[in-house]
Amino acid sequence: MAAAKHHDILAGLIRLHILHHAAEGEFFGNWMIEELREHGYRIGPGTLYPMLHGLERNGYLKSRTDGAGRRARRHYRATRKGRDALAVAQAKVRELFNELDKSR
Ligand SMILES: [Zn+2]
């Protein structure tokens, strides 16, 4: 499956994609799986949730749970630290994009 392929390299891009949406507003896990799929990243819950938990543990995301039992849904959004990291990364991505683009 394409998901695991090049995962180490792509994981940073996926995290930035997650942070980007988390800075815009709340999302929940299944929405993010679909969103990433539309961008060509085929990642499942077994990959996404550990990433979300890691981002939360490191202070980039915060979550809240809505509902209870089987209907419970966890929503995520960016913290101040997450938005700061995104701003730093945006500048780096732009610079990298320019360099990659030049070398084609
Ligand atoms: Zn997106």
Image: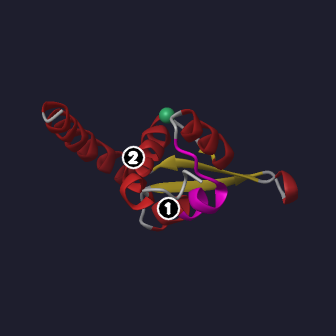
Which of disc 1 and disc 2 is earlier in sequence? 2
SS for dot 2: helix
Point 48% across, 38% down: residue: 21
Percent position of residue 64, x then y: 64, 54
Q: Where on the picture, by quarter, is residue 11?
A: bottom left
Q: Is residue 10 above or below residue 31?
A: below
Point 49% across, 43% down: residue: 22
Label 2 lies in ligand 1 vicinity (Cβ under 8 Å):
no
Name the residue tied to disc 1.
56
SS for dot 1: helix
Residue 72 horizontal side relative to residue 16, left or right:
right
Between residue 44 and residue 65, name the one nearer to us.
44
Kindly check if marks 2 and 1 are in contact, taking CB atoms under 8 A apart as contact.
no
Look at label 2 and name its amino acid.
Leu
How are the residues colored?
secondary structure
Residue 93 horizontal side relative to residue 37, left or right:
left
Considering the whole magenta stretch, tell me its main secondary structure: helix
Name the residue tied to disc 2.
16
Question: How many numbered discs sit on the rendered protein?
Answer: 2
Percent position of residue 17, x then y: 44, 42
Quarter of the image with the C terminus is top left
Look at label 1 and name its amino acid.
Glu
Q: Where on the picture, by quarter, is residue 27?
A: top right
Q: Is residue 54 above or below residue 104?
A: below
Percent position of residue 95, x then y: 16, 38
Span colored in magenta: 41-50
Q: Is residue 43 located in the magenta-colored stretch of the structure?
A: yes
Point 83% across, 56% down: residue: 68
Label 1 lies in ligand 1 vicinity (Cβ under 8 Å):
no
Between residue 103 and residue 50, name the one nearer to us.
103
Residue 46 horizontal side relative to residue 66, left or right:
left
Percent position of residue 43, x then y: 58, 51
